Image (cartoon, rainbow, N blue to C red):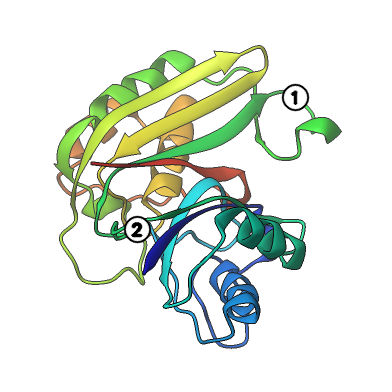
Amino acid sequence: MRYLLIVQYDGKNYSGWQRQENAVTIQQVLEEKLQILLKHEVNTVASGRTDAGVSAYFQPVHFETEKKIDINKFLYSLNGLLPDDIKALSLVKTDIHARFAAKKKTYLYKMYLSNIDLPLYSNALRVEPNVDLKLMKKFCKLIVGKHDFVGFRASGGVNESTTRTIYSARLVRDGIMLNFYVTGNGFLYKMVRNLVGTMLAVGMHKLDFALVKRTLFNGYKSKHTAKPEHLYLLNVEYK
């Protein structure tokens, strides 16, 4: 039987989702706790890998077991075993493949406008208030659609098609908060962070917008990568 588990985590203390040698990851911790409850080896599959330091409000993960599960009791016990920065939100029996059945993913990058570092906004990236928001919003419009995003894939990414479809990209200001939302059918290695870094470089006039517009999908190579600790996997949609 396959079960789909929705997990929320603060990734700042972990080396990303995927299990690694000599590093603590979300997958490792989750599988260890699941194995305690199920009393057999458990292999989890997430909707996608998040990088070191990246968090998730909503990360779908599936696993398989032959044991019958009382969902409410299982969730209660699992959350009792999990650390405070990883929690299970829901569990359902399903035939969904957490990765291959995912149709849309939405990421959120948190920023705030200030001349100084503000202690209560440490979960967001500080941006100078004079940043050109109009140019940043123009950049958002440029990336919507089906494009080859090879210029936004960091080295170390696997050899796969670099074409992705971005359904929406929005920059939303709420007081001093500045949130970037991007929804696509998938993202390359560090692609979202490279998009944010390039957008900020354009907004701070460190990159010429006209040049970026001409070369965005034809020879552009991102040299601006935003920090991971302000990036969040916000939602994953299935058919």
Q: Earlier in the sequence, mark 1 or mark 2?
A: 2
Q: Name which residue type carries label 2.
A: Ala
Within-10-Å neighbours for mark 2: few <14, some 14–19, many 20+: many
Classify 10 as above or below 31.
Answer: above
- Residue visible at 61% across and 13% down? 174
Q: Name which residue type carries label 1.
A: Asn
Asked whether disc 1 touches disc 2, contact meaning CB atoms under 8 Å apart, the reply is no
Q: Of residues 78 and 178, which is closer to you in this image?
A: 78
- Residue visible at 44% across and 30% down? 181
Q: Of residues 14 and 4, which is closer to you in this image?
A: 4
- Residue visible at 38% across and 57% down? 47
Within-10-Å neighbours for mark 1: few <14, some 14–19, many 20+: few
Query: Where does the image place residue 59, in percent across and percent down from the top left?
Result: 48, 51
Marks 1 and 2, how far apart at CA: 42 Å
The mark found on residue 115 in the picture is 1
Tell me if residue 118 can be seen.
no
Relative to residue 218, is residue 236 drawn left or right?
right
Q: Of residues 78 and 155, which is closer to you in this image?
A: 78
Classify 225 as above or below 176.
Answer: below
- Residue visible at 45% across and 71% down? 44
Query: Where does the image place residue 51, in percent across and percent down from the top left?
Result: 50, 61
Query: Where does the image place residue 212, in percent across and percent down from the top left?
Result: 28, 34
Residue 154 quadrant: bottom left
Instruction: Look at the image and tell me in which quarter the N terminus lies.
Output: bottom left
State the residue position of label 2: 98
Callout 2: helix, strand or loop?
loop
Query: Where does the image place residue 37, in percent across and percent down from the top left?
Result: 63, 76
Residue 2 quadrant: bottom left
